[in-house]
Amino acid sequence: MFDNLTDRLSNSFKALQGKNKLSEANIKEAIREVRRALLEADVALDVIKVFLDQVQTKALGLKVSEGLTPHQAFVKLVEGELTEIIGGENKTLDLKTQPPAVVMVAGLQGAGKTTSIAKLARYLKERENKKVLVVSADVYRPAAIDQLEVLANQVEVDFFPSNINEKPEKIVASAKKHAQKQFHDVLLVDTAGRLHVDAEMMSEIKALQKKVNPVETLFVVDSMTGQDAAHTAKSFADALPLTGVILTKTDGDARGGAALSVRHITGKPIKFLGVGEKIDALEPFHPDRVVSRLLGMGDVLSLVEEISRKVDHKKAEKSAKKMAKGRFDLEDMRDQLLQMEQMGGMEALMDKMPGMGQIPQSVKNQAMGSVETKKMVAIINSMTPKERSHIKLIKGSRKNRIARGSGTSPQAVNKLLKQFEKMQKQMKKMGGSKMKKMMAKMAGMQGEEGGMPQGMPDLSKMKLPGMGGGNKFPF
């Protein structure tokens, strides 16, 4: 996400590396590079001007705190100003009303509006414990009603049927009555999209908004359209009392112009990010965390939350106990690979880790690709239970059988076995008192609400290439 901007910003700060103090000359040089980075990211010009004016004014009078270098002090300043300009703090949905809380979702065709409603329904059901009903008021595109029904079944929330012969206002009024009778907490309304903003569309949405009186009116916008996304959102915000924005397709957006422009131009907060095609790929928008990732510092809080939410705690605890006894086998390795895939794959996790921005993308792809992970899982699945726990049994003929069964080659099987043997040796080195101490620490974290599950590594002790300060995570 926003990889190009991250790389450009990292290069911008190099002008201050090794400097003993901040001067007007080196600050101007750094700001000039930051400006170029933001222009290439397709950030709106007025946003760039406001942001850089604030940075320059504060940088010239900046006092470098004890323990920080001038370079670090400037990065900290940029981090604070970027966070402020994209929203300051996380803005959650305000659903404090007599149920059902009606949330109306608008947007142009192709922005991912209907899919975002399904993702939001899943989010509210699983993470906010809400009973959700969805309804489509898009009477111009019959496929939109069918699409929402299919997605509602997929995320296991209730769907209110509608048809193209009804008026949108009547559809939503009926859905609201049904939601009241069935004690739904939230009603999500999908509105008609258009290929572009026009007067007729605005008139219809205004009439629906007035009739429905939703507690939240969200606008879905495609981040890939850059600053155009911000200006489209502004057109909607001028016509409708928007309460927030859902920014979609951020996983494919290397520039980040929309994310940095929307809040300033519309005055409305970004509330969610669409971060992939999977139905669970929706994240609350935390400005400070996004900026941290932009500046190559990672997003540790989101990483911990994701691990805590998606990891199978029982399997992780079982693996940890086996590790402590030196009995870690290929079945445990497969379980860990599958859990990693459940969280979006190793690359998605590494994107949230500090220092990963300095590792070339080609290296990350080679080392952590989803295809490689699936290949490894296929190889392990092609083994017998006995082979998974006794790898010494896997000789020539067995390797050939496993390769055929997994659709790979004997060389790929050999590579996996070598990787596993290295892991086993590492586990044995960590055996005894070291492993017991680590498990005790993880057990302590397990006891804290929302803590990390047992069996997950102590991230504070991990090291990565290209990181300063002893190569350790700052937490």
Image (spheres, rainbow, N blue to C red):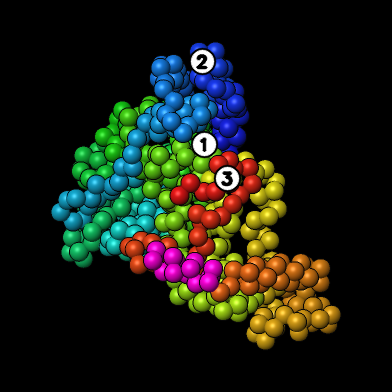
* Quadrant, the N terminus: top right
Task: Name the residue type under label 1.
Answer: Leu
Q: Nearer the viewer, residue 212 or 310?
A: 310
- Characterize the local packing of mark 1: few (<14), some (14-19) or many (20 or more) Cα atoms within 10 angstroms: many
- Say which quarter of the image contains residue 418: bottom right
Which residue position is annotated with label 2? 23
Tell me which residue sits at (44%, 16%) in the image. 60
Task: Name the residue type under label 2.
Answer: Ser
> Above or below — where is 454 with respect to 277?
below
User: Quick check: is 441 in the magenta stretch?
Assistant: yes
Question: 346 left or right of 63?
Answer: right
Mark 3 and mark 2: Cα distance apart in space: 28 Å
Residue 210, image x and y in percent?
21, 39
Task: Name the residue type under label 3.
Answer: Gly
Tell me which residue sits at (35%, 29%) in the image. 266
Tag on residue 470?
3
Q: Earlier in the sequence, mark 3 or mark 2?
A: 2
Q: From the viewer's perspective, is the residue at label 1 or at label 3 nearer? A: 3
Question: 222 left or right of 421?
Answer: left
Which residue position is annotated with label 1? 295
Magenta region: 433-445
